[in-house]
């Protein structure tokens, strides 16, 4: 199923009105979580409401992001060409503020003020309302109240487990490349080479988990 960005956001658990994502009974959408987060970040300049959705999603599901994977994906986007990529570091600061310490390597502290929204508008708003403290200490100047964090704007873990196979597997196998490799296998990808290419991981873990999963299934079949 080919999905647009809004549909992929819904598939990873965001509630967007007017976005259709019709599933047949028993269907589970496999939409890559980190790639969807990154793509959403790159659209914030066009739709600022995405920032509130991302922060809300992180509050509920941030522990189930493979931060190493997100970091690897982010390296391909230089700030000179993609200035909105700084939002990844701001999201990491928010996750860390909420006790998700594994996000710490993704936090980038800036010496020069980083205005995540247009500078003139931000400066005026900050004079009236102040800046968000946990972002300000990392060099991000964002007016208080400009990011609306509402948990009800995203699915609960129980709801998302039923809809997203990748997310479900991270609950079962841990938040790791292993979980994503198994998701690829269950989604019908036939070779470790293809899995490594699609996920962006190295061949060794793809091959090892592929072999272990196939062996485990064979043993289960024999026992049955």
Image: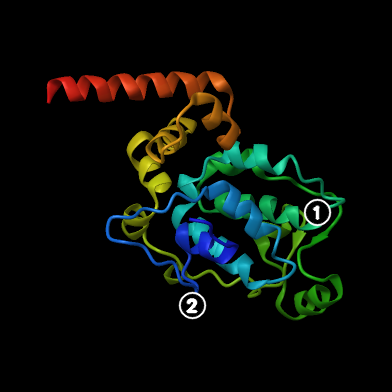
At label 2, counting other C-alpha atoms closer than 10 Å, the crowd grade (few under 14, some 14-19, many 20 or more) is: few
Which residue is found at the position 52% from the left and 64% from the top?
A: 7
Q: Residue furthest left?
A: 224
Disc count in the image?
A: 2
Quadrant for residue 136, please give it: bottom right
Q: 211 above or below 2?
A: above
Which residue is found at the position 46% from the left and 35% from the top?
A: 189
User: Which one is earlier in the sequence, the residue at label 2 or at label 1?
Assistant: 2
Secondary structure at numbered mark 1: loop
At label 1, counting other C-alpha atoms closer than 10 Å, the crowd grade (few under 14, some 14-19, many 20 or more) is: few
Q: Residue 17 bears which disc, if any?
A: 2
In the picture provided, is 67 more to the left or to the right than 81? left
Locate residue 22, reporting x and y percent: 39, 67
Distance from disc 2 to disc 1, alpha carbons, whole Å, reads 28 Å
Locate residue 10, reporting x and y percent: 48, 64
Q: 142 above or below 214?
A: below
Name the foreground residue: 207 vs 67. 207
Name the foreground residue: 220 vs 161. 220
Which quarter of the figure is the C terminus placed in?
top left
Q: Residue 82 bears which disc, if any?
A: 1
Which residue is found at the position 86% from the left and 54% from the top?
A: 112
Locate residue 23, reporting x and y percent: 36, 62
Q: 25 above or below 34?
A: below
Q: Residue 51 bears which disc, if any?
A: none
């Amino acid at each position: 199923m080919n999905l647009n960005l809004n549909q992929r956001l819904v598939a990873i658990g965001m509630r967007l009105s007017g976005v259709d994502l019709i599933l047949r009974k028993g269907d589970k959408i496999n939409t890559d979580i980190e790639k969807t987060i990154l793509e959403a970040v790159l659209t914030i300049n066009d739709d600022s409401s995405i920032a509130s959705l991302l922060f809300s999603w992180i509050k509920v599901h941030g522990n189930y992001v493979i931060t190493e994977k997100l970091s690897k994906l982010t390296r391909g986007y230089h700030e000179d060409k993609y200035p909105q990529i700084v939002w990844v570091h701001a999201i990491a600061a928010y996750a860390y503020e909420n006790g998700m310490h594994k996000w710490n390597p993704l936090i980038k502290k800036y010496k020069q003020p980083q205005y995540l929204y247009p500078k003139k508008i931000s400066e005026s708003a900050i004079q009236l309302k102040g800046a968000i403290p946990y972002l300000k200490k990392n060099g991000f100047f964002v007016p208080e109240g400009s990011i609306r964090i509402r948990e009800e704007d995203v699915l609960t873990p129980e709801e998302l487990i039923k809809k997203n196979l990748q997310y479900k597997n991270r609950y079962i196998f841990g938040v790791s490349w292993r979980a994503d490799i198994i998701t690829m296998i269950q989604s019908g990808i036939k070779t470790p080479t293809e899995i490594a290419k699609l996920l962006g991981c190295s061949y060794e873990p793809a091959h090892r988990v592929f072999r272990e999963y196939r062996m485990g299934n064979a043993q289960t079949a024999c026992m049955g």
